[in-house]
Amino acid sequence: MRGPLIVSLDVWNREGLFKIIDQFPTDEGMTVKIGMELFYGEGPTIVKELLNKGFKIFLDLKLQDIPNTVKMGMMQIGRMGVTYTTVHALGGSEMIAAAKEGLELGSEEAGVPTPKLLAVTELTSITEDALENEQNCKLDMVDQVVSLAKLAKRSGADGVITSPLEVSSLKEQVGNDFLYVTPGIRPANFPKDDQSRTATPKQAAEYGSSALVVGRPIIRAEDPVAAYHKMLEEWNYAN
Ligand code: C5P
């Protein structure tokens, strides 16, 4: 089955959040993404409130630290009852494994399902030049992303965040038994904003994305619920 279309709630505070979220039906098992700006501003209670309303949560905090610190942080996240969360693959194999262990420990303790651990490979803001001259990486971007995705997989991550345009080559090299969650989704004829390599929900389905992350085309739409349902339909019913 095709995974969810995750609505990225990139807002600053609870007022902004509920202005959008209160328009959505709560009985559809919809998944929403909370990032660091909202989480740092409002704290874990915002996660609880959304869970209590019936939403599934992707808590996107992109952890990277020494393995023990990440493990403890992930124990806290594991207890919350979220469905997905993130680490930087650049933190290394031990850190990714520790993140997974923390999620398992926290979720078991709280009696909730273990969140799926998604790894960020190279940030899309990193250029080939920065990769070579700041990170001193000998690989080109594609090989580096594949290498980090493989590292994440063998360290216990459940998937990666990636551009929809990279999914098919990643799938070939990393395998089908891994999640490829893709932002950079735009309806046809919609402005790209600051995203440069975009795909429509239908194209993302054709490339093999496991789940979509969509922000501005939904949360800044005149009718966010209608925009969501339109994109969801395209995603669910693409061949
Ligand atoms: O508004 P838009 O649809 O571009 O939002 C996409 C969401 O996905 C944002 O929360 C953005 O931070 C996130 N994201 C991304 N590209 C990545 C990783 C995350 O756009 N490589």
Image (cartoon, helix red, strand yellow):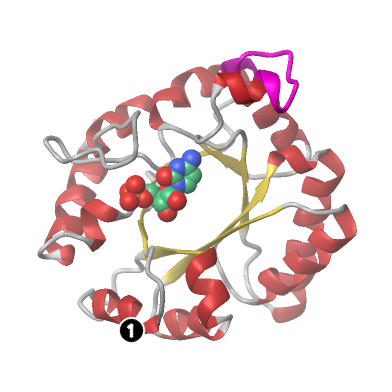
Image point (30%, 40%), residue name: 185
Asked whether residue 11 is drawn in magenta, I would say no
**Residue 76 percent location from the top left of the image:** 72, 74
Instruction: Report which quarter residue 130 is drawn in.
Output: top right
Q: What residue range appears in magenta?
A: 132-143
Apparent side of residue 134 relative to residue 192 in the rendered image (left or right): right
Q: Compared with residue 156, is residue 45 higher up or lower down, i.e. above or below?
A: below
Image location (x, y in percent) of residue 4: 37, 53
Residue hosting label 1: 15
Horizontal placement of 102 versus 211: left or right? right
Q: Specify the quadrant that holds the C terminus.
A: top left
On screen, residue 79 versus residue 220, left or right, reads right
Q: Residue at x 23, y 57 (%)?
A: 218
Q: Magenta segment: does it hold 138? A: yes
Nearer to the camera, 133 or 230 = 133
* Amino acid residing under circle 1: Glu
In the image, residue 12 lies at what x, y percent?
Answer: 41, 72
* Ligand 1 within 8 angstroms of badge 1 C-beta: no
Rendered position, 133 above or below 36? above
Where the N terminus falls, by quadrant? top left
Residue depicted at 37% across the width and 65% down the height:
9
Q: Quadrant of residue 136?
A: top right
Give 239 or 206, whichever is nearer the viewer.
206
The reply to whether residue 5 is visible in this rendering is yes
